[in-house]
Amino acid sequence: MSAPPDCTVIVPTYNRSHLLRHTLDSLARQRLSPGGSFEVIVVDDGSTDDTAEAVADRHDRLDLRYFFQEDQGYRVAAARNVGIHHARGGICVFVDSGVLLHSGALAAHLAAHGGSEDPVAVMGYVHCFNEGNEDGEQILREIDFTDPDASLRRFTEQQRWPDLRESYYARYGEELGALTAPWLMWWTCHVSADTAQLRRVGGFDEAYRSWGAEDVDLGYRLHTAGARFVLRRDAASLHVPHPKSYRSNMASAAANYRYFAEKFDTPVARLVPDHHFEEIEDLLRSRGLADGAVTDRFGTVSRAMDQATAEGSGR
């Protein structure tokens, strides 16, 4: 029996075969250290296009497995859980259809995990992600799909279309372990986590049946379980633009954030539906809860916040 791969790349998809092809092609260009290996699991959430053919065409270039689940509505959480269940690698890297990885991205993920004794949750850096497909046509014209590395290098040098979280990193720094709620920025368009820890915390909550928050939910649980959050800029990627509705996505996310708050019902979780993610970190800092003594586990944070709230109200 062959040795397990170093990591498993999990790609959920639904009727986006053209985007999936770009993602798989970028995975075929990955450069790992000698002896390094990875597998790819594509989980199809009920596509009716030629997604299966797009996968089959790349079996000769990738260690690739394909799973299909019937279309029962939006089930990306369930799709990713299929990937976690079948993963043979010790690290799971989550990538969305249409995300093109730099050729050194997987090596960067593996370096982040290999350099820590404790489980880590890694955030890749995502250029060109937009909320309402703004600049979509221009970005498409400027991406060199045959050489994503060159496009990434050019966009970085020109400081064009940086990661949407750049303002967050500029505001709070890149030492995410010093933050109270780094899980708010762990977005599964391009992240990774320890496979064993993902299984221990229960994977994605499949009650999320519309866009948004299933990654924040899992990030929250990884944090409470002791994962250390890390930004790796060298795990770089491009998010290929595609049609989307910002208004629709935000309405969906708002409902999911309310579910998140009710599910965990902690002071930190209850801030999520009504505050911008950057505001939440500010609120926690203003209450003296941003130091390591109270941010290492959310149980500690919650108790401290409850105490601060009680003192502030005179109770």
Image (cartoon, rainbow, N blue to C red):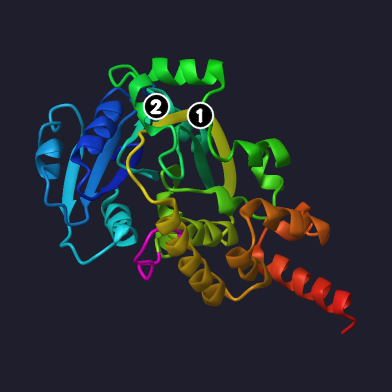
Decide: few, some or many residues near mark 1? Use Cα within 10 Å; few <14, some 14-19, many ≥20.
some
Q: Are marks 2 and 1 in contact (CB under 8 Å)?
A: yes
Q: Residue at x 26, y 53 (%)?
A: 86
Which of pointers 2 and 1 lies earlier in the amino acid sequence? 2
Q: Which residues are magenta?
A: 205-213
Say if 61 sits above or below 198 in the image.
Answer: above
The kind of secondary structure the magenta stretch mainly shows is loop
Residue situated in front as seen by the camera: 182 or 152: 152
Q: Can residue 191 be seen from the camera position used here?
A: yes
Position of residue 36 measured from the top left corner of the image (x, y, whole percent): 34, 27
Say if 239 sits above or below 118 in the image.
Answer: above
Position of residue 135 measured from the top left corner of the image (x, y, whole percent): 43, 32
> Label 2 amino acid?
Ile
Q: Which residue is mark 1?
A: 161
Say which element carries label 2.
helix
Q: Which residue is mark 2?
A: 139
Image quadrant assignment for residue 136: top left
Q: Can residue 1 be seen from the camera position used here?
A: no
Say if 34 sits above or below 106 in the image.
Answer: above
Task: Describe residue 223's horizontal placement relative to residue 252 as left or right.
Answer: right
Residue situated in front as seen by the camera: 53 or 227: 53
Say which element carries label 1.
loop
Image quadrant assignment for residue 41: top left
> Label 1 amino acid?
Trp
